[in-house]
Image (tube, helix red, strand yellow):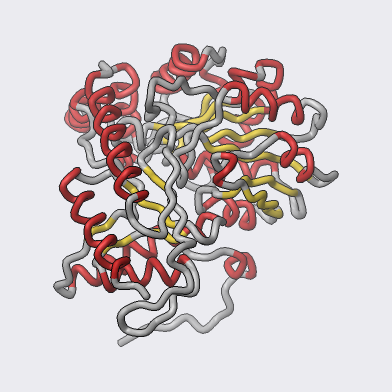
Amino acid sequence: MTISFSLPLSNRLSKVKPSATLAITAKAAELRASGKDIISLSVGEPDFETPKAARKAGIKAIEEGFTRYTAVPGIPELRAEVAAKFKRDNNLDYTPENILVSTGGKQCIYNLLMAIINKGDEVIIPAPYWVSYPDMVLLAEGEPVIVACIAAANFKLTAAQLEAAITSKTKMLFLNSPSNPTGMAYSAADLKALGEVIRRYPNIVVATDDMYEKIMFDGKEFATFAQVNADLIDRTVTLNGVSKAYCMTGWRIGFCAAPADLIKAMSKIQGQSTSNPSSISQKAAVAALQGPSNELDEMVRTYEARRTWLVDALNAIEGMDCITPDGAFYVFPSVAGWIGKTTADGTILKDDVAVCEWLLDAAGVALVPGTAFGSPGQIRFSYAVAQETLEDAVNRVAKAVNSLE
């Protein structure tokens, strides 16, 4: 018997949409379960193992009975290690009181929005953006202000665009570098230019999502906003975690650094939602941050080689245009050359969403439409899969494209 819920749901629920990446992943899994051969390039999850040191620390925590509640903002050992990480990697001076550990980076962002956004406050979000930013702003009763950033500018927000987007209601700016979905990273010079604008508006907070910080290519150095604009550290929230760099997506540990009074406010929100993050995962995260970098270095070299191959392979497909990303494990090519064409079954591809639906059915390749990231006409490939799987997927896409009229 199916049990239905007849009472009205909350009004806030109508403001948000389901995650497009999860929806595509679910559809791909459904097709795979029905017997169809599907390659999924839709999930933003590393295909490497969690570092040995972290795995051993997690096992040790279980065996030693470290399985109880911890302090809401995280265990002192991890908060101290995160503060040390920010000093070591970013030359940012934080104490453990400036650190909050949450159940994934997403909860850090949600805590932040719930702590400082009031109804009607505007949050500037450069597009392409990570799919959850606008919807989390809406859940906090804020207003997302989307600023389109074009491929010719490497999908990055310019100082002029930022200045034009600011109003008397602007409360926050989101930055994500390297970006999901584009893989492009803001240089120190880029961040300095944005900082010059922010400096003139003392009521704006900058939230910088650095989750892919460790995955940079071509010898490029990562820079974060507070590092470049040291005088704005009291208005900056630096967000990070162990999910991507340390292949610990399922461990659910994110963290952030901010002024201590803001951290207390965010901890208050967390205390009434999830309380502390997993005790076992926190111990594993300590080991990951302290551990040797050889496994990380190997992963980055592998991703860089895949990226170089994939960009060349996609640009060889008629109607596709792909710029070379700085980091992360995504490419974000334009498929404008395919829109308006007709498939073998007579369907006209009207937009990037239709392109992804067609490729899933015709080629058995799951990709995410750029519309989900606020950038219609693009699609996102994740190359966090084995090289042979990537080559198979690209061959399928190329074959399908050759059938278009």
Residue 384 vs residue 310, the one in the foreground? 310
User: In this rendering, is residue 128 above or below 6?
Assistant: above
| Residue 275 in view in this figure | no
Q: Quadrant of the N terminus?
A: bottom left
Residue occupying image coordinates x 82% and y 45%: 167
User: In this rendering, is residue 308 above or below 225?
Assistant: below
Q: Position of residue 360 (x, y in %)?
A: 30, 68
Q: Position of residue 161 (x, y in %)?
A: 72, 41
Q: Position of residue 175 (x, y in %)?
A: 59, 37
Left or right: 363 in relation to 258: left
Residue that sits furthest to the right in the current view: 168
Residue occupying image coordinates x 63% and y 26%: 191
User: In this rendering, is residue 225 above or below 314?
Assistant: above
Q: Position of residue 195 (x, y in %)?
A: 70, 26
| Residue 343 in view in this figure | yes
Residue occupying image coordinates x 31% and y 32%: 304
Left or right: 316 in relation to 109: left
Q: Quadrant of the C terminus?
A: bottom left
Residue 270 vs residue 345, the one in the foreground? 345
**Which quadrant of the structure image shows residue 246?**
top left
Left or right: 352 in relation to 26: right
